[in-house]
Amino acid sequence: MSAVIQPQTAPAKRFVVEHYTLLDGWVPHGTLIEDGVEFPCSYDTFGDAIDDVMTLFSEINDQIENGAREPNEGYDAGEFQIHDFEKNKIFVLEFHEGVLKVVYPDNLTTVSAAGLRTIHPDSITI
C-alpha cells in the first residue's frame, strides 16, 4: 500500500524547502510518511532549512567529485526556495560566484547562506 499524498496539508513546522519541477511546479523537497500519510519535511528554524539545502548541495558536489554523478546532473540553486508558512514569505536561493545566497522577499537584500544562522526571518519586512 502506498502513502496518500496530502499536498494541501500544512507543514508541522514553520519552514519548508521547496524544489521546482516542470510537472508540478513548487513541491516540498522532502516528505515524511506518518500513519500512511505523506507530509512535507519542515523545519522549526530558518537556519535548519538552510542547513538542509547546503547539505544537499554538498552531497551533490561530493557525488560529482567521486564520479557517482555527472557534472551536468546537479541542481541549480534557483530550483529551490524556502517557504515561511507562518509569514507566507518565499526566500529565493541562488548561486553567485560559487556562493549560495538567499534573496529575501523584498528582492533587494541578498546575503551569503553561510551567515544566515544569525539572521531571523521575522526581522525582514516587505
Image (cartoon, grey):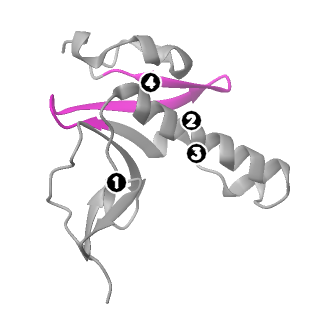
CB contact under 8 Å: marks 4 and 3: no
Say whether disc 4 or disc 2 marks the residue closer to the N-terminus: 2
Furthest residue to the front? 35
Is 102 one of the magenta-colored residues? yes
Using the image as rendered, state which of residue 78 and residue 56 is in the foreground.
Answer: 56
In the image, which residues are magenta? Answer: 83-104
Q: Which mark is residue 77?
A: none
Point out the image quarter for the N terminus. bottom left
| Secondary-structure class at tag 2 | helix
Q: Indicate which label's residue lies in the foreground, 4 or 2.
A: 2
Q: Position of residue 31 (x, y in %)?
A: 36, 60
Q: Earlier in the sequence, mark 1 or mark 3?
A: 1
**Residue holding disc 3:** 56
Labelled disc at residue 54: 2
Earlier sequence position, callout 2 versus callout 1? 1
Disc 4 from disc 3: Cα separation: 16 Å
Residue 116: x %, y % from top left: 45, 17
- Distance between the Cα atoms at labels 2 and 1? 16 Å
Classify mark 1: helix, strand or loop: strand
